[in-house]
Image (tube, rainbow, N blue to C red):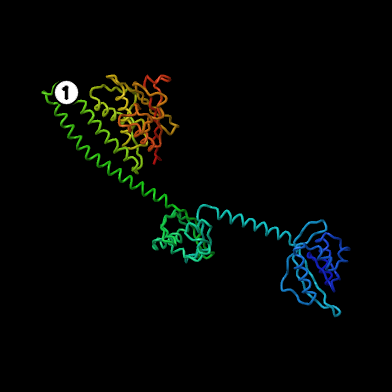
Amino acid sequence: MFRTLADTSLYGVMLLQDGRSLYVNSALAKMTGYSLRVIRKWGITDFLARVLDEDRPMASQQYGEMAAGRVPPKSYVFRFRRKDGEIRWAEASGNVVEREGKLVVHLTIMDITDRKQTEEALLKSETRYQELFDRVPVGIYRSAPDGKPLEANLEMVRLSGFPDRDAYFKADIRDAYVDPDIRRRWQALIEKEGVVRDFEVQFRRPDGQIFWVQDTARAVRDADGKVLFYEGTLKDITERKAAERALEEARARVEFLNDLMAHDLNNINQGLMFLLELLLSNPALPEQLREQVATALEQVVRGVALIKRVKKFTHIDSLTQPLSKQDVVSILRTATRSVAQAFPYKDLRVESQLRRGRHWVAADSFLLDLFYNLLHNAMKYDSKDTVVIEVEIRSDEEEDFLRIEIKDQGRGIPDSEKARIFSRLPHQPDFRWTMGSGIGLTLVQRIIERYGGRIWVEDRVPGDYTQGANFIILLRKWRNTTT
C-alpha cells in the first residue's frame, strides 16, 4: 500500500536508513532531473550535494535531527540544483519510523518553485505599489470610525505633522480637527451619503499649526452595512485659501474705493457741470472763453462717463444671474439713440436692413453697454461731421451663434494693433486706438466673454485699414434650453 501511494505521489518521497537510500519514487527523480536508476543509489550525502551551499547547513541539520529520532516541528525550505543546472526551490517535511530496531527517516519533498516565484513577484508588486503609494503628492489614508489610523502614505504623515508612521498611528484622527463639531458633521455626512467630496476643513498639527485641507473620502461597509473604515485623500489647500482670502479683501478694498470715487467724484463733477453750464448760459461770457468753458464741460462729462464704466466693469465679475432672451435690434437702436445724444454736434447714421423681433441672443442688460461702447468709439474717432456705421447680422439656422458686424468709416486700426485693442493696459504710451478711458473695448470683451461669445476686428476694406474697421461679434443664439 505504501509503495502504491508513494509511486503515484506527485511529491518526491525518500526513505533513508543510516544515511543510505532504501526507497525513492519517480516524482523525486523527475524533480531532480536524474533517472530513477541513478537516484536509487543516492545516500543523504549525494542528496545534500545538490543543495545550494547557502542552504546546505540548514538542510543537513534538519536531517541530523531526524536521524537522531527528533522530528522537526515544521517543514523547511531550501534550494537545490537540478542535473541540467537549473536552481529550484523545495519544501521538505520528515517523519521517523522504526524498522527492525533501526530508525528510518521518511522525507517528503515538494517542488515549490512556482509558488516562490509567485511570492517574489507579489513582493515586488507590493514594493512597487508601496513606492507609488508613498510618492503620491496627496495624503492617502484609511481610518476607523473611532479615529484610529489604519493606513497612510508618507505624504499623509508629513501633511499631518508627524515625524514618522509610528507616531502617526499612535494618534487619534479626531484630535486633528480644529472644530470637533466639523468632525461630527463630516462623519454624519459620509455615513449617510457614503462619500464626501472636496470637503474643506481646518486641521491642527501636533505643534499647534493650523492649516486647511480638502478631504475626499468614502465609507467602506461590511455585508451587513456596518462601516468598517473610511478611506480617502487629503490635499493641503492652505495657500489657496490664503490667496482666496487676500483676493476677497482686495475686492472689498476696490469696491470701497470704487464706491468712494463714484460718490465723491460724482458730487464734485455735478458741481462743476452746474457751474460750467451756468457760465455757458451767461450771455456776458466773452466769446473767446466760451469754447474753453465748453471744452472743460466736455472733459467733466467724460469723467462722469468714466466713473460709470468703471462701476460697470467691476460689477460684471460679481454677476450670478442667468442670461435671458434679448432682442439684438431693439437694444442696438436704443444704443444708437444714446450715442447720438452724446455727440450733439455730429450726425450719426446707422445703415442696416434689420427688423425687431427676428434676432434673439442669450444676454442681459450689459448688451446695451456693449453696443453703446462700440458705437461711441466709432463716433469719437471719426473726424467727419456725419458718421456712417453699417450693421449686418448673419444668422444660419444650423449655427449656434449670431454673427454681428459693425463697420465704421473712421481712421481704422493697423494690423499691429488689432490684437491689442481689447487690452486695458496698452503696450505703447501713445496708443490711440482704445477709448479715452482705456477700458471701453476691454469692457466690451468682458461682456462678450460672459455671454460665451467672441469679438475681433478686421479692415472694413480688406487690405486697407485706413478705410475703417469692422468689429465682428459672435453671440450665442437664444434657445429654449439656454441657461
Return the x and y of residue 421 as percentages of the image width and height. Answer: 38, 29
Q: Where on the picture, by quarter, is residue 447?
A: top left
Q: What's under tag 1, amino acid-wise?
A: Leu
Choose between 205 and 175: the one closer to the eye.
205
In the rendered picture of this protein, how many numbered marks are placed on residues? 1
Return the x and y of residue 311 as percentages of the image width and height. Answer: 29, 38
On the rendered structure, is 301 left or right of 6?
Answer: left
Figure check: 460 above or below 444 = above
Looking at this view, name the residue that lies furthest to the bottom.
101
Return the x and y of residue 255 as percentages of the image width and height. Answer: 29, 43
Figure check: 408 above or below 98 = above
Q: Where on the picture, by quarter, is residue 49?
A: bottom right
Return the x and y of residue 203 as percentages of the image width and height. Answer: 42, 59
Q: Residues within 10 Å of mark 1 (few under 14, many from 20)?
A: few
Choose between 188 and 465: the one closer to the eye.
465
Q: Which residue is mark 1?
A: 289
Choose between 335 and 161: the one closer to the eye.
161
Figure check: 25 above or below 293 = below
Quadrant placement of the N terminus: bottom right
Choose between 63 and 430: the one closer to the eye.
430
Quadrant placement of the C terminus: top left
On the rendered structure, is 326 left or right of 221?
Answer: left
SS under mark 1? helix
On the rendered structure, is 83 left or right of 452?
Answer: right
